[in-house]
Amino acid sequence: MKRWLPPVSKDPDQARQESLFYIVLGVLSLTGGLFAVISLALALLNGSPWEGVVAGILVQPVYLLALILARRGRLRAAAYLTVSVIFLAMIYGSVALGLGHATYIGYAMAVLAASILISTQSGILFAVLSMAAQILVGALQQSGALNPSNAQLPVNTLWPDALTLGLGLIVLVAISSIYNREMRSSFREQKQLTDTLQKENGELTQQVKENTHLLDQRIIQLRTLAETSMAAGAERKPLILLQSIVDALHQRLNLSSAYIFLWEDPGPQLVLRAASTPEVQRMVVRGYRLPEESTSLTAQSASQKRIFSEGTLAVEKDNPLSTGQSELAFPMLIGDRCLGVLDIQSVSANAFDDSDILTLRGITQTLAHGLEMARLNGQSLTDREEIRALNRRYMADAWGNLENMSADLSLSVESGGESGEDTITPLAPSPAGAAAISSSISRSEDGSQVTAPLILREQVIGSITLDTGQKAFSQDDLTFIEAVTTQATLALENARLYTELSRRATYLQTANEIARDASTTLDLDLLLRRVVELIRERFGYSHAAVYLTDEEDQRAVAFAASGQAAPDLIARRSSYTAESTSLVGHALSTGTMYAANNVEKDPYYRADPLLTETRSELAIPLIAAGRIIGVLDIHASKPNAFGEDEIAILQTLSGQVAVAAQNARLFSQVSLRAERERKVVEITSHLRSTNDVSSILQTAVSELRRALGISSGTVMVGPMRPAKIEEPKGGSATNP
């Protein structure tokens, strides 16, 4: 019934009563309709009275009117109308047809409807009225005032029947009342239960809403954390990373502001590098730095390396960074190192709970690792570019001077015709200003030549040009050419590395031989001649010489030399002073190595007429015990002859030579001193072997003359005249 006629009232009890009225009204309407149909059938079949048909039909409009009243909220009036119509219809039936069971049933329906739809008192009232109507109609029939057309019950039992009807109706009302009371009690309990359930449902709904809100917050936090992690892993530009993080936090967490300070030099100081609000972003552009005396949460978090929070803040009008009532400051830590501080603020007091702190701490750590990764990535890119630059420089140096490897690096190969042997013609190297070689296989403008580059470690070191005429090459041909040039390039590099390795092996062998000679030879002349010969021959230089300083350290004199000009340099005793404008003089005055790889443009180079082929010169000071004892001077007939490897080995050799020369000098001095001491002992022995004064004097002068290498000497004792002792032609001393 509720589907077709939902209650109009919002009150649950009234709505229940309204639904019950619709049910009763429907049953009464159906019963009246059936009664009319049955009465019509009986009237047509056996001539029964038509009053039943009329009554069954006439009640239907009344029921409709009662329904309209109920739908308009006048349920009590509708109920009284319905019950009254039933009651009146039963009185009409009793008057027209006579007393009978049908009227009893009608009275019962009226009384029951009044009891259910209105109240128990109304049911009792209609029960009494039904009994009174029974007595009145029965009395009128007994008196003959009423002559019903179909009286079914004798009137001589009127009073027992009326009493029985009244009592039965009252019992029916009582049962209905009990039923109504139980129903109302049940409905009250149901209402209480419903109210309780509604209250609990409301509380549960509110809790669900709160939990949903918290869950949404957690989802936002986790999503922000995930996006932060993704940004930190993908973005390699620190400033862009920082700005994206503060923007995401500001939008997702409903913040009043978010900004990031980083420790930067000089100082170091905390520098504002990212902000989520336009006002603070202008401070970022100006390079705002946190004052050293600042006591803000940002400064405390950075200095103490821990999280600081404030639930209620008094916004400082003179502080442009204070924009809310709650603030959190998170240090961005990598180990024990603090990179900076993430500071967030909210307009609400006590806006951040433990879960916010936990999530934001994770975001801060992710951000710190992202910054460190960005820094390491930048450093890696810088290092990679430096390595590539060094590699390019190395390749340029390695292949720049082609004479170190072979003189036949540019050549032409032609078919030998009938002989079958190829004709090889050396070519001059390409000039410095020649056009650059393409990094891919190319064809000349006229299509007669194909040039394939020789590429080694991203550097073009040469090319192979093929005279093809008008022959067309397929992609397979070009792939074949590329494969051959690649292998040729690798073979060239292997050959260069082998040559370089052999050259270094020669250098090291030379160093070992010189070190061995320096440790076993005390003959300074022999040692230095051996050193300059090995350096000139093994290193391929045109001239090598050792200049040693004299006793007063005023001048460095050529002591040993190797090369065509060596005898002349030694013969003229070529020398340099520390003040002279020359590479040797510069090495003597500063004590540092000096290399002139292009003597024509070097200010310290001084030309020597004996060394006209010199194009490069190297002067290395010989230092022993902190004192400059000489210079190793080397000349080369080609420019740029002294590379880092050669200079490093020659400096090592110069140290060994300096120590060996110093040892040889000391050994010579010690040997000379020992020889003189031996001669003193010998002279003393000769002097003590005689007691003759003249013999003693003669022996003393003779021994001194021989020891010092002089031809004569004079001795004078007391007032006697001098006695001169000369070397006679025969070899014995004479006293004139």
Image (tube, rainbow, N blue to C red):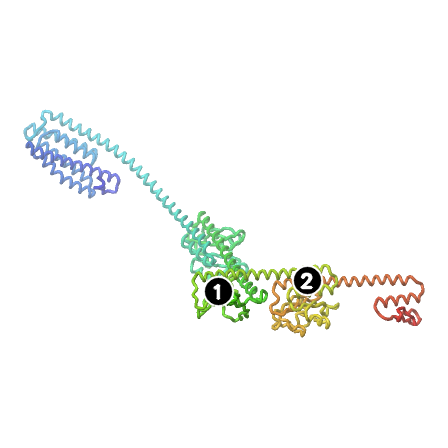
According to the picture, the residue beneath numbered tag 2 turns out to be 655
Q: Circle 1: is it few (<14), some (14-19), or many (20+) Cα within 10 Å?
A: many
Q: Is residue 510 left or right of residue 679?
A: left
| Residue closer to the observer: 555 or 349 | 555
| Residue closer to the observer: 449 or 87 | 449
According to the picture, the residue beneath numbered tag 1 turns out to be 452
| Residue closer to the observer: 207 or 431 | 431
Q: Secondary structure at mark 2?
A: helix
State whether residue 129 appears in this view. no
Q: Residue furthest bottom?
A: 609
How many discs mark residues in the rendered view? 2
Question: As displayed, is residue 133 above or below residue 205?
Answer: above
Residue 726, x across and y down, in percent? 88, 71
Q: Secondary structure at mark 1?
A: strand
State whether residue 107 appears in this view. yes
Residue 722, x across and y down, in percent? 91, 72
| Residue type marked 2 | Gly
Q: Is residue 550 left or right of residue 457?
A: right
| Residue type marked 1 | Ala
Q: Nearer the viewer, mark 1 or mark 2?
A: 1
